[in-house]
Amino acid sequence: MADESGSNPSSGKVRLSTSPSPGAQSQSAQPRFILLVAEDNLPDALLVREVIRTERLPFDVHVASDGQKAIDFIIEAETDTDAPCPDFLLLDLNLPKKDGFEVLERLRSSEKFNSIPVVVMTSSNSPADRNRAAELGASYFCKPPNYEEFLKLGGLLKQLLHGKMS
């Protein structure tokens, strides 16, 4: 029997927040991609969803609210053939439990997911963080202070999609 949260306590599996992007039904001919968003700040996760909706990007979004949940998502995708497999990762660096670099290192050590596109999305503008992200093959997006600038994330996601589809 499901509890009030809608989860099935007897399944033993951790399911993260998921939702198809708006318009998924009307764009069924277009391929869909799984975007794992590792972000503990709910307003930022909602802004990501807004960018995807505004740009009409073909992403089904899965949100992991801490680094351990992101790693668990990756592990489940590696081991369970029915689990969603991330095609892209949008990754905050300052996550609880495991930081973003721990998540990125775990992803890069995965035989199945070591080459998926990653965008580090963080408030850190540290050259050391930028260099480390680049060394691990990730793009870098510094969280801007305003909505209009945040929407520029859509252009970066479009570039990654273009690279994946070509």
Image: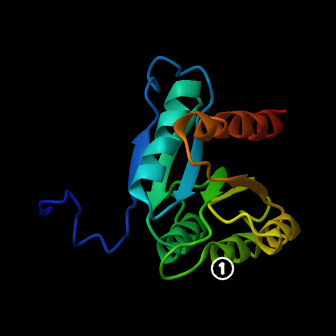
Left or right, residue 108 beside residue 83: right
Residue ranking furthest to the top: 26
Residue ranking furthest to the bottom: 97
At which x and y percent is residue 158?
72, 33
89 vs 44, nearest the viewer: 44
**Tag 1's secondary structure?**
helix
Question: Image point 40% across, 60% down: which residue?
Answer: 16
Amino acid type shown at disc 1: Glu
Question: Image point 62% across, 30% down: which residue?
Answer: 31
15 vs 70, nearest the viewer: 70
Asked if residue 49 is positioned above or below residue 25 in the image, the reply reads below
Residue 56 makes an appearance in the image: no
Question: Image point 56% across, 64% down: which residue?
Answer: 77
Asked if residue 135 is positioned above or below residue 143 in the image, the reply reads below
Left or right, residue 12 beside residue 103: left
Residue 99 makes an appearance in the image: yes
At which x and y percent is residue 100?
63, 72
Bin the neighbour count of mark 1 within 10 Å (Cα to Cα): few under 14, some 14-19, many 20 and up: some
Question: Image point 76% across, 76% down: which residue?
Answer: 109
Asked if residue 70 is positioned above or below residue 58 in the image, the reply reads below
Q: Quadrant of residue 37?
A: bottom right
| Quadrant that contains the C terminus | top right
| Quadrant that contains the N terminus | bottom left
Left or right, residue 114 beside residue 86: right
Q: Quadrant of residue 75?
A: bottom right
Identify the residue position indicated by label 1 in the image: 102
At which x and y percent is residue 68?
50, 77
Left or right, residue 4 beside residue 41: left
Asked if residue 13 is positioned above or below residue 145 in the image, the reply reads below
